[in-house]
Image: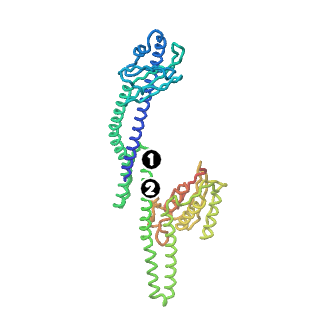
Amino acid sequence: MKLSSKIHLYSSVLMAIILVVMNLSVYYVFSKMALDSQMAQAEVEASSIAQGVARSSRSIPIGDLLRSYVPANGKIQFVPADPSAGSPSVTSSGEDMEELRVPYSTDKQVRQIQYEGTRYVLVSLPVIWNDGTVSNIQISRSLAATMETLQVLRIVLLAVTAIALIPIIVSTRVLGRLIMQPITVLTRTMQDIRHSGRFRRIELKQSSKDELFEMGSAFNDMITLLESNYAKQEQFVSNASHELKTPLTIIESYASLLKRRGLGRPELFQESVEAIHSEAIRMKEMTEQLLLLARNPEDWQVEMERVDLVALTKSSAKAFHDAYNRQVEVKAEATMMGWTDSRRLKQLLFILLDNALKYSDELIVIEVVRKQSEIHVQITDRGIGIPRDELERVFDRFYRVDEARSRRGGGAGLGLSLALDIAQAISAQIELDSLPGVGTTATIRIQAAP
């Protein structure tokens, strides 16, 4: 059964049950109030008749008294304490109605009695008679009019219930469709994505903030994530196939050359091995960078903390000097604490230092300065520089400035793109300032506090 049909069925049944229970409650309360009112009225009337009969019992015969007080559609009866004595009664219809009586009792009794399909209220009152004995005056009144009213009420309530079920059924059907509309749109969108292979999002009504809106918003967020991952995957495959083609071709060419002439020409053997080794190292570095760029920012496992930026910069400069035998000077006045991830920041510094190493043969300077609420780490080289109109594009993947980023001397064009992703992951910013023939300054702006 479809969810809309379940909503329709359950809502209709629930509303029908509520309507029936409500009407039954109305009928019960009304019937109880009506019958209680009739019984109270009968009790008051019986008490008045009993007092009148007791006052006139000395001067008027009991039979005449009963006939003068007989209620309409009812019966009045005198019940003495001695069961052997007579028990005269008078009815408004002239029938005997012997069953409309209760045994003698000195207690007041008010009850309902069924007689020949008609309900009566019977009141039995103890009365002190003229000879000092205690007798009973029993008065019965028909409840036929009240029962007819209750019968009409039952018919009216049944009719109202039957008529009210029609709009209930229709409204629950409409309600089911309204509730299912966002889910239907969601299902159709997913089916369209599956058939067409294109990512789509659901148009959400900003005025609504219910669970269905949250579901649609979560779906759109999921589609955004899937689209981003899919784009990263496509870009990774495209970039990897494009960039790895050249080193693989070089390796294949030199391997073929070694296979044909390497044994007879030692100098060719040495050249080929060096070229293959160089291209293999470049492929390894490129693959590592591509894998890092293909990861989502959520997978970087960033651990933000207070870091001594001066100490971290000095340790990075020393490691770089030991690895490449290049002089790196660090300028900093005192300890400066920043809010960052030390591991990712060191990786970012190595990327920028590696760029400075590739495009500069002179001294590399790292300066750490405080500017208001930020700490600036500036890496300056005296290399070939970058033209002003090329600065905005150097962060694009695989982009190289023609004169500076040759395949032999430069990298794959992934370093600055990776640096930008790392900076975003640790809530830092990168700025480049460069002049051709003068050099380049890369500035990392780090927050001093969370």
| Residue 282 place in picture, x, y as percent | 50, 72
Left or right placement of residue 90 versus residue 344 in this view: left
Foreground of the two, 89 or 12? 89
**Above or below — where is 321 with respect to 26?**
below
Q: Is residue 1 left or right of residue 385?
A: left
- Mark 1: which secondary structure? helix
- The picture quadrant where one finds residue 35 is top left
Q: Quadrant of residue 94?
A: top left
Residue at far bottom of view: 264
- The reply to whether residue 420 is in sight is no
* Three-letter residue code for mark 1: Glu
Residue at numbered disc 1: 211
Sequence order check, earlier mark of 1 and 2? 1
Residue drawn at the location 51% of the way across and 76% of the way down = 278
What colouring does the structure picture have?
rainbow
Amino acid type, callout 2: Met
Q: Label 2: how many residues lie within 10 Å, few (<14), some (14-19) or many (20+)? A: few
79 versus 164 height, above or below: above
364 vs 124, nearest the viewer: 124
3D distance between C-alphas at marks 1 and 2: 16 Å
x and y, in percent, of residue 379 in the image: 57, 60
Q: Is residue 124 left or right of residue 375?
A: left
| Nearer to us: label 1 or label 2 | 1
Q: Give the residue drawn at x 40%, y 18%.
A: 70
Q: Which residue is mark 2?
A: 222
